[in-house]
Image (cartoon, helix red, strand yellow):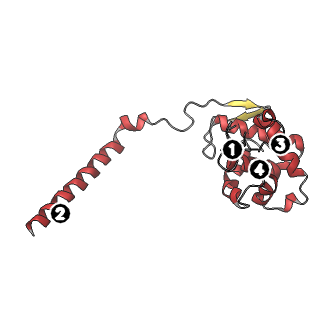
Amino acid sequence: MRKAVVALLVATLVVAGGLFAASRLVASPAVVAAVPPPCADATATTVASRAVPKGPVAGFCAPELAMAATILQAARDQGVGQYGETIGVMTAIGESGLRNLDYGDAAGPDSRGLFQQRDNGAWGTLADRMDPYTAATNFFRKLARLPGWQSMTPTEAAHAVQVNADPGYYAQYWGDAQTVVAALGG
């Protein structure tokens, strides 16, 4: 019995000591200052006459928001309207996190760019897939050719263009896409 009481007392002291140390760590200004705020190194910019904030907007900073602004410009040039713009941004969020990736994944090791477009001839050359404006233009051209895309859910439309494995995959990015498009004046 005595060993059990001693063990319980030791365990209680260890837990209490850990909680005390954690509370001191969280409250320490030196530790808080060591973690830079999101977008601390970002700089506001302009893309195609569109002001791009440094962020964060829906968790994205200026480099990603500049990619979104490029997608919006391609959408405008293709005349797909705000719904189409937002579908494009949603798709790029889901495919690359709005980053122009020069690598693919297990499902598509040959995929590249903002939209992770495959090397199957449908999306142009590697240079086309790596150019954000051209990749977005190719996305919107295919979207515009889909009969009735305007009445599809955003994820259905994105899936019909991208032909990914999960038709519902993009739905989780719709809210962030709406926020980004609104912030960029879409």
Q: Report how far apart the C-alphas of labels 3 and 1 lie in the structure.
A: 15 Å
Amino acid found under the numbered disc labelled 4: Thr
Nearest-to-viewer mark from 1 and 4: 1
Amino acid found under the numbered disc labelled 1: Pro
Lower sequence index among marks 3 and 2:
2
Nearest-to-viewer mark from 3 and 4: 3
Lower sequence index among marks 1 and 4:
4
Amino acid found under the numbered disc labelled 2: Leu
| Screen quadrant of the C terminus | top right
Residue 109: in sight, yes or no?
Answer: yes
Give x and y (percent) for residue 22.
31, 47
Q: How many marks?
A: 4
Residue extending farthest left: 2
Amino acid found under the numbered disc labelled 3: Trp
Residue picked out by circle 3: 123
> Quick one: label 4, few (<14), some, or many (20+) residues within 10 Å?
many
Give x and y (percent) for residue 164.
74, 55
Residue found 8% across the figure and 66% down from its top: 2
> Quick one: label 1, few (<14), some, or many (20+) residues within 10 Å?
few
Residue 109, labelled with which disc? Answer: 1
Residue picked out by circle 4: 86
Residue picked out by circle 2: 8
Q: Are marks 1 and 4 in contact (CB under 8 Å)?
A: no
Q: Report how far apart the C-alphas of labels 3 and 2 lie in the structure.
A: 65 Å
Q: Report how far apart the C-alphas of labels 3 and 4 lie in the structure.
A: 20 Å
